[in-house]
Amino acid sequence: MKAVIVGAGPNGLTAAAVLARAGLAVSVLERLPTVGGAASSVTAFGDRAVIDQGAAAHPFGVISPAFDDLNLERHGLEWVHPEYPVAHPLPGGRAAFLQQDADLTAMGLGVDRAAWLRLHQPATDNPRATASSILSPLVRLPEHPLLLARLGLRGAWPASALARTVFRSGAAQALFAGSATHATLPLGHPLTSAFGIAFGGVGHSTGWPFARGGTQEISNALRRAAEEAGAKIQTEHHVADVRELSSADIVLLDLTPRQIVQIAGERLHPLYGRRLRTWHYGPAVAKLDLLLDGPIPWQDTRVERAGTVHVGGTIAEIAAAERAVAHGRMPERPFVLVTQPSSADPTRAADGSHVIWAYAHVPHAWQGDTAAVIESRIEQFAPGFRDRIIARRVNSPSDLEQWNPNLVGGAIGGGSLTGTQQLARPRLFNPYRVPLRSSAEKEQPLYVCSSSTPPGGGVHGMNGWHAAAAVLLDLGR
């Protein structure tokens, strides 16, 4: 039984390892010269630093059931943890901190100590069960039904409403809102609290680590796991049409709806094809990599020791920025996510310099001045920051899409979580199997294993894991 996987991102590589381990003859075809897709790294700034081209910190990678089962540490992956998983600078020069300890985090939030612990308790008490529940398809029998119910009661709330209801201090509200903003949705949207609770809860337990040497090391470890199981991986092989893969018994696509339509449109069931053609990608990111001659001079110097920094200000500022972006307007003060890999991995930059990775939430396909927007936002909380910049590398939303076509319009999550796309990714039942038109049903079956399927975006491999499970179930294995 021969399976071909188009795309060697972390989901495609995870699916390859699972299927090869089950005895299938697996080939992976990747258009770029290296594996990893958006989970990749390159040397930059005259070989003075290693920068991550896509994701940088990995709260759900370190706790991923797929990565755990594939034992990526045995294949060379090493997680490194900063002193603080997350910092959130606030007006007036102070900051709030998410620590790898729920009690220490809560102690730093004063009057909201008890409320913070109560809200995050389900995720903090059993982080691995939380990750398993969150990183699974929604339409299934839950493995941890009581835990999922406890999370659901809190997580169903809009993040802005929940934060203002349960917390009294601006610090706790902002810290929670920063985590919820990873949904890339307005904070008034239902279910955004689930992101805040989940990201905070796993951060308390397993942190928000980096891969030593860069995110590319996650993809390299996945490649080694897949090849050890027998998979063959070919880079610089572009697939323009699934008809090129006629020798395969099964095809898996680590692609988003736009690319699936491009290479398989004639085979898709009409209703499914219409769903993919109207797929909404949502807001984008504009990305900036920097080489500094020292750490960012944050007003609260403890922020230098944080791996991830949410530069968003108050909950009101964050909510206003995300609302504007969702409506296609560039906010005056956008939400900026900064990571400081050098805080945990000094090998990422040479000669005492520091590498900084940052992106701003911006409207879809925005074409403004990325560097100016991000640098001015950081400067508000770190006066003198610009004076430390040695070199910069700028990526607009269109630059990101040109590099990786899955990042349509600069959107990084495989599709917006608004409307029905929060549940039907891209359809509600059996989301990994592609429905074919009747004239194509005798051809090889198609599956989707990208971030456009549950559980959505992120470097955790779970989309590929579940897609591979769907293949094996259909094969009676």
Image (cartoon, grey):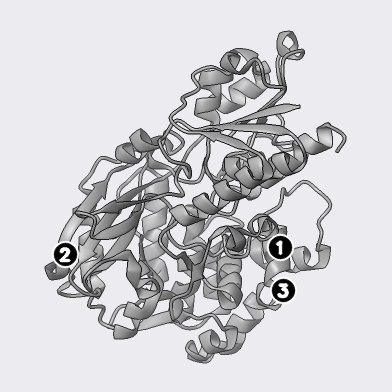
Q: Which residue is rendered at x = 42% and y = 59% of the image?
A: 56
Which residue is denoted by mark 2 in the rendering?
389
Which residue is denoted by mark 3 in the rendering?
126
> Callout 3: helix, strand or loop?
loop
Q: What separation in Å lies between label 3 and label 2 (alpha carbons)?
A: 41 Å
Compared to 274, does 418 lie above or below? Answer: below
**Can residue 112 be spotted in the picture?**
no
Which residue is denoted by mark 1 in the rendering?
152
Q: Which residue is rendered at x = 63% and y = 76% of the image?
A: 120
Q: What residue type is labelled 1?
A: Gly
**Disc 2 packing (10 Å; few <14; some 14–19; many ≥20):** some
Dot placed on the residue nearer the N-terminal end, 2 or 1: 1
**For this rendering, which residue is in front, 342 or 263?**
342
Please identify the quarter of the rendering in which residue 471 is found.
top right
On the picture, is 134 further left or further right than 104?
right
Dot placed on the residue nearer the N-terminal end, 3 or 1: 3
Q: Which amino acid does label 3 sit on?
A: Asn
On the picture, is 344 further left or further right than 194?
left
Q: Where is residue 209 in the image (x, y as percent from the top left)?
A: 49, 69
Q: Position of residue 186 (x, y in %)?
A: 47, 54
On the picture, is 321 further left or further right than 465?
left
Quadrant of the image for the N terminus?
A: top right
**Disc 1 packing (10 Å; few <14; some 14–19; many ≥20):** some
Nearer mark to the viewer, of 2 and 1 = 2
Q: What separation in Å lies between label 2 and label 1 (alpha carbons)?
A: 44 Å
Nearer mark to the viewer, of 3 and 2 = 2
